Amino acid sequence: MNATHIGAIDIGGTKIAAIVAGPEGPLARVTRPTVKSGPVRALPDQAISLINEACAQAGVDPAAVKIAGIASCGPFVREHGFLGLSTPNLCGGHTAAVDLPNDWNVIPLEQVLRERFDKLVIENDCVAALAAERTFGALQGENDCVYVTWSTGIGFGLCVDGHILHGKHGNAGHAGHMLMTEQMDALCGCGNRGDLEGLISGRNVGRRLNTSTSELFRAARDGDEQAREIAAEAAQWFGRALYNLTATLDTRRFAVGGSVWLHHGDWLAPIVLEEIERRFPALTSGVSVTTAALGSLVADIGALSLIIPEEWIAPWRATQPWQKLAS
Ligand SMILES: [Zn+2]
């Protein structure tokens, strides 16, 4: 298919972004708070109207954008043969405990978007971020590698033997919910106690000192002993999880993104690396941990990377045209 333009949509729990791009790079990007009320198809309908809005901004005929890449928070389920979204942050039908103004159980993401696009690739946001880092970022040329985000949640994108792992419903990489201990009162949004996200997510770390996460990590950086202890312990849990993945998948390189890492990776990295390197050298020697290169735009660029025409990649690598989206 000879595309003149492509679309990309990044669906998060609080914000949705849509981009329209041409061979020379992204042309327009629009964002809105993610819709959380209305009929069950409100969210994919919102995505479509944002793509059309981006087209209008860019002066592109919406009919020219028939290919789209989607990066979305998960998890996914399959319903009537289509991928649907079953995200606790968005679907109010799951539990009365979460305060959401809807009774959605499964958002028919793929089914609705197929009405608008001829070609569609939908991936979890961390899988899309992995694709972005492999195409344009810190994981170029790496066949055995992992993208990790450490932010309000913890998520992974996994690549082994050059193949990006998907799993039965596209949920491979939800390893933030791997159990690390049941001995701590660390409750995750998924209901687990003592899984990785429960222990170290941006939501939970700060709670232990009754402060915000960003405050806690800032205090730790500035030398506050109690904050430092909690932050270092979080980095150890994180490092152990990376060790577990190394032992399971035999991967070589981790690229880490997310707000916690982007602000504090410089001093957390040695703690994390130590947790990997002091275990089973036959598996861990040569494993590296690096900071993701694409910053806060990684999922947006990831959504583009899922469907970018091959011949656009080299010029984009040379000119990095996504930089102008950062403003
Ligand atoms: Zn969990």
Image (cartoon, rainbow, N blue to C red):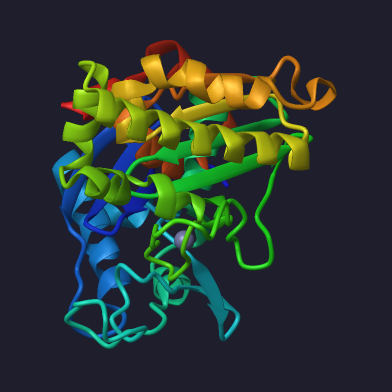
Q: Residue at x 79, y 20 (%)?
A: 281
Q: Give the side of residue 269 with respect to residue 27, left or right.
A: right
Q: Quadrant of the C terminus?
A: top left
> Does residue 230 lie above or below 69 as drawn?
above
Between residues 112 and 270, which one lies in front from this camera angle?
Answer: 270
Between residues 313 and 224, which one lies in front from this camera angle?
Answer: 224
> Does residue 236 lie above or below 248 as drawn?
above
Between residues 92 and 232, which one lies in front from this camera angle?
Answer: 232
| Residue 215 at x, y percent in the picture | 16, 33
| Residue 316 at x, y percent in the picture | 44, 20
Among all residues in the image, which is located at the extreme top?
A: 318
Q: Give the side of residue 174 with respect to residue 90, left or right.
A: right
Q: Give the side of residue 54 with respect to residue 4, left or right.
A: left
Q: Residue at x 62, y 55 (%)?
A: 172
Is residue 270 at least partly visible in the picture?
A: yes
| Residue 64 at x, y percent in the picture | 36, 51
Q: Residue at x 26, y 23 (%)?
A: 225
| Residue 275 at x, y percent in the picture | 60, 26
> Does residue 74 lie above or below 78 as drawn?
above
